Amino acid sequence: MLYYQSGSENTVIGPEDLKNGLYSALDMLGPKKRVLVIPPDFTRFHSRAGDITSLLYKYYKKNLSDILPALGTHAPMSEKELDTMFPGVPKELFRVHDWRQDVVTAGIVPGEYISEITGGALGYSWPAQLNKLVFNGNHDLILSVGQVVPHEVIGMANYNKNILVGTGGAEGINKSHFVGAVHGIENILGKADNPVRKMLNYASEHYIKHLPVVYIHTVIGRDDSGELVIRGLYVGDDPEVFTIAASLSLKVNFTVFEKPLEKAVVYLDPSEFKSTWLGNKSIYRTRMAMADNGQLIVLAPGLKEFGEDREIDRLIRKYGYRGTPATLEALETSDELKENLSAAAHLIHGSTEGRFSVTYCPGFLTREQIESVNFSYGDLSEMLKKYDPGKLKDGFNITAAGEEFFYISNPATGLWSSMERLK
């Protein structure tokens, strides 16, 4: 059921509204003695999940026993990131998810079902994996917190993805990412109903329905001044909490252009984007908007690596972003890629298939490193002079030389497309 819902394209949920709405839902749930909170990590800082987690701590106090950031394959959060994202929350409450070691398999989604939902493209079974603390922690309430926003792997982020991928295991994450890649990123972005979501919903219904999970979803948009604000807050324990939030997210986070973009410039906040594993959201979220032979320029002052995980970083450096045919060909003979299907999926997602160019302007990687994975290299200092984030506004801009381009200050907050890509 829905315990709280508020939102529209014009709604602004301020700090007091957030607190009051959240606490009214918690009051309906009744007293709890052992609460687990599963927020996203720092890569989803703008979700406002950190503020919500801080409010949850103030509400439950000593009865909040564990906080498990849904890292997925990401690196553990630093103390500075914890302090910044979760002000006032004791660090001893935080647990670190190890996607290779800390998981249990709750059940298996059969290969016959995977074949059915992928139109026969894939027939492997899928393990519904999650952190053992979530499955065996004996909590009387599990609060999954996060933002519903267009997503490259599962169409729309959050709901049971936060648990079955965010606290999932190596095989489950790998295979789920590959289902999304095979279905096609442009067939999945912004769609709440798709093969990956169907797979997770099957697992939720059959294997983790007994867990006391309640979802807290935000929808984040920009106001007239360009500031990020909460447009929606939804708290519930069934699929409706996700579908309602997803419907609003499409209205708030999806921008459609009459004609494709010839040039786009995307800025990656250095505190949030340190790898192409995350930074390639600049490609995922704009690919449906880019014109054939268009140019995407990515300003990435914090970029220092390709993968958040050491092994995935190595695989990206070895195989590069060379398109679907090249990646599938490598898969046929590479055991290491077969064992890391999420890396293979990422290589497919991060390629433009040669349709438009990507110029990465990194803070810490060299020209040789950038070009070795099949991106073009741009000098960051030169590009920052030409495209100064401090002076640009989100949307269309024109340089002193008369060059028009579309600027995006944070690709994680939206999805962009041309009309022709929606037909």
Image (cartoon, grey):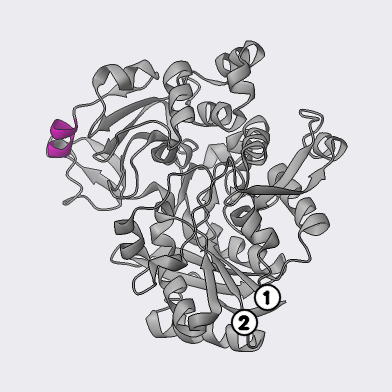
Give the image quarter of residue 376.
top left
Measured as percent of width and height from the top left, residue 65 is found at 54, 72
Give the image quarter of residue 79.
bottom left
Residue drawn at (71%, 64%), measured in percent from left and top?
A: 239
Identify which residue, 276 or 397, lies in the foreground: 276
Mark earlier in primary sequence (1, 2): 2
Measured as percent of width and height from the top left, residue 127 is found at 74, 42
In this rendering, would 235 be left or right of 68? right
| Local secondary structure at mark 2 | loop
Q: Which residue is mark 1?
A: 140
Residue segment shown in magenta: 380-385
| Local secondary structure at mark 1 | loop
**Is residue 383 inside the magenta stretch?**
yes
Measured as percent of width and height from the top left, residue 179 is found at 68, 35
Q: Which residue is mark 2?
A: 33
- Residue 260 visible somewhere in the drawing: no
**Is residue 57 inside the magenta stretch?**
no
Q: Main secondary structure of the magenta part?
A: helix
| Numbered badge on residue 375 | none
- Residue 405 visible somewhere in the drawing: yes
Residue drawn at (58%, 36%), measured in percent from left and top?
A: 185
Up-down: is 162 above or below 361?
below
Q: Amino acid at mark 1?
A: Asp
Identify which residue, 107 or 419, lies in the foreground: 107
Q: Amino acid at mark 2?
A: Lys
Identify which residue, 328 or 315, lies in the foreground: 315
Up-down: is 19 above or below 67?
below
Determine whether label 1 and label 2 are within 8 Å by CB. yes
Distance, label 1 to label 2, CA atoms, is: 7 Å
In this rendering, would 407 be left or right of 278? left
